[in-house]
Amino acid sequence: MVNAQPAGNNRHVLQTTDLSDGSGEALQRFTALGVGARNRNSLLYVFDAPMLRLAFRPKTPQDGQILAGEQAKASQALSMALGSTLATALWVDLFGPAELARVRSFVEAGTVIARGASPILMGVLIDAGIPLSFQVLACGAYPMFASISQDGPYRGVTKMPITIRVKMIDSQR
């Protein structure tokens, strides 16, 4: 399927598939007809329905917005994955593999508390007359200055044991 008039000779043919029987039959016919036999061919597995429709219609100005939005989502997901991986590696280096579960539980608990408290805190600051733009700058500047103020990445500490003491209260008394 061609979605627009060719602008010149094709050097690269991009074919999409959703791994359905119809898609497989179309690819076999494409090959049997010899279309694009002298060109570089790529096969793209498309599994997201909004992106699949881009392959089957002429290009529109909205396509750039759709693709930019998808690219932003992909970048965010990649950043989250890399951040999680790097944080885990840092925690293993700082605290040791035996303490990893304990460190991770503390970090997750702190994240939950921060996510719950931040809207309240920001609302109080807005009510106090501190503009949101200043709050955003402060939230961005704090980690930067905290990391700059360190003597080194670990401040001379390679492994820090974490001790958690839990006191069980007997409710039968």
Image (cartoon, helix red, strand yellow):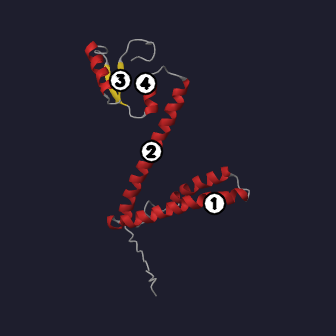
- The residue indicated by pointer 4 is 55
Could you say which is closer to the camera, residue 4 or residue 50? 50
Residue 97: where, in percent of width, then height?
A: 32, 64
Could you say which is closer to the camera, residue 45 or residue 147? 45
Q: Residue at x 51, y 36 (%)?
A: 69
Q: CA distance from mark 4 to mark 3?
A: 9 Å
Q: CA distance from mark 2 to mark 1?
A: 27 Å
Quadrant of the snapshot with the N terminus: top left
Q: Earlier in the sequence, mark 2 or mark 4?
A: 4
Q: Earlier in the sequence, mark 2 or mark 1?
A: 2
Residue 19: where, in percent of width, then height?
A: 32, 30
Marking on residue 97: none
Q: CA distance from mark 1 to mark 3?
A: 50 Å
Residue 161: where, in percent of width, then height?
A: 38, 71
Amino acid type assigned to the residue bearing label 3 in the image: Gln
The answer to whether 33 appears left or right of 168 in the picture is left
- The residue indicated by pointer 3 is 15
Residue 131, placed above or below residue 63 = below
Q: Residue at x 41, y 48 (%)?
A: 81
Please tell me whether mark 2 or mark 1 is closer to you in this view: 1
Residue density around tag 4, few if under 14, some if 14–19, many if 20 or more, within 10 Å? some
Marking on residue 77: 2
Secondary element at tag 1: helix
Q: Do the numbered discs 2 and 1 sit on residues whose CB atoms are within 8 Å?
A: no
Q: Earlier in the sequence, mark 4 or mark 3?
A: 3
Q: Is residue 158 visible?
A: no
Kindly indicate the quadrant of the structure image that contains residue 48.
top left
